[in-house]
Amino acid sequence: MPRSAEDRFNAGKSVSSEFGNFSNAPRPLVRKIPDPEPFPIEALNGLLGDAAAAIHDQSQAPEAMCTQAVLAAATLAVQGHANVELPTGQKRPVSCFFLTVADSGERKSRVDELALGPVSKHEASLRERYDEDFPAWQNGQDAWEKQRAQILGDKKGYPDQNAKRLALNDLGTAPSAPLLPMQVCPEPTYEGLVKMLITGQPSIGVFSAEGGQFVGGHGMTMENKLRTAAGLSSLWDGTPIKRVRAGDGAVTLPGRRVSLHLMAQSGVMAIILSDAMLADQGLLSRVLLTAPRAASGTRFWREPNPSSDIAIKAYSWRLLSILETPMPTAEGKNNELLPRTLPLSLEARTKWIAFSDHVEHLIGPGGDMEPIKGLANKLAEHAARLAAILALVENLDAEAVSGSHMDAGIDLVQHYAGEALRLFAAIAISENLRIAQEVLDWLMNKWGKPEVSLPDIYQNGPNAIRDKQSASRIVNILVDHGWLEPIDGGGVLAGKKRRDAWKIIRVAA
């Protein structure tokens, strides 16, 4: 029987509870990461939920990964059409940033291929149109430049400045170039992203089944990371891009929308979640994270259900029809979006306020959500964005976000909150505990003797410890957790008298 949203939320809170003590047995240095809760796929009732289940059936990839991919594709499809209006009066983009953790072999590329199928078809259509329009634009541009040069150089026909000005006014501005036909890019730098938003589509997605390419790419090097994090955060907020460069001059880009979905291995996730700069810039609080249990070892051959193909075709047709629907743009602009406002219904507004107050109770000192305060402060907005996405996919002309859509949005963000508590708590352990775990692993697997002394640790142990002071600090942690027991009066180890020595407590893991 599916667990309720409250059950999933409370399960996530268990990450912040202390380990229990069991008689005199040693205590773990680092908490075991709890198993992930099932993704609330039932919140995506209807077309998107059926598509996620169908992709799961055809790929046998983790269900959460399939659902994230479908949600991300849906976000890209609708984000240019509307902004959601919060009860605060703020009008916010519906763009979302998703991160899915899955190691190699979990069929990330296959899931992305199926979920982004309608986006790929739309991109192909954009390229075909671009190839048709570009020659005509190039000819028009050449003719315009030739005519402009002729006006400026013809002293007889246009003898004074006023005559030239009137002729240039009659000539008009240069013809607008066709927009670049790229809608998805896997690893852009922030500068590259901005340039693409100047000359390309006003609604794009940063999508990659190999998120390590983005994290390890040029845009996330030490010198560029701050710019990328700050820029992506501003794009999520819907703030107009403002840039001043010596070569390019000044540019202001309102009305642009960017969504993001990275699938990354657990090592990449650890890099992202432990990066203080990304946290300080607020980027991590704008990311919706899930890390499902691996499916490898369970994917034995079976024929996919025939209904899965039907569900994926219905999903593809719906998203493609949205992508091909012209987005509202500012007058005279072909890539400056002017999304309409999508308000919350009275029922949705009531549910949003209740959820916002519920979260506020949990983020104070000692509260269950204090460890993820940055994300928690934005949970209600995340819920409204997701609810609006579901409403727009169902009906692009929806007049308001319904109460049932808000229920779904809240259900989804409670899963993300539980995942953040589970994963951020696992990453955010002290450096001393990390080293202590490394030393404990060395004692159990490589040392092979019943006792140990300080010189044994800092002379022969892990490279993280190379002096007496560091070794003493780590030994105190291991003693406190019950893994080392002081030997009264010291001991003789390898034929040498040691004043400080400890007995190693070896128990089954």
Image (cartoon, rainbow, N blue to C red):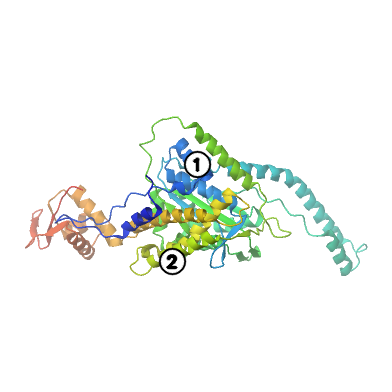
Q: Quadrant of the N terminus?
A: top left
The residue that mark 1 highlights is: 50
Rendered image: mark on residue 357? 2
Taking depth in this image into account, of 296 and 394 the one nearest to the observer is: 394
Q: How many marks?
A: 2
Q: Position of residue 254 (x, y in %)?
A: 63, 62
> What x and y, as percent, mark residue 282?
47, 64
Most extreme residue toward the left, as rendered? 489
- For residue 124, above or below residue 224: above
Gap in Å between the C-alphas at discs 1 and 2? 32 Å
Residue at image coords 43%, 66%: 357
- Asked if the residues shown at circle 1 and circle 2 are in contact, with their CB atoms under 8 angstroms apart, the answer is no
Tell me the kind of residue under disc 2.
Answer: Asp
Mark before the other along the chain sequence, 1 or 2: 1
Label 2 sits on a secondary structure element that is helix
Amino acid type of the residue that numbered disc 1 sits on in the rendered structure:
Asp
Which one is nearer the viewer's eye here, 27 or 277? 27
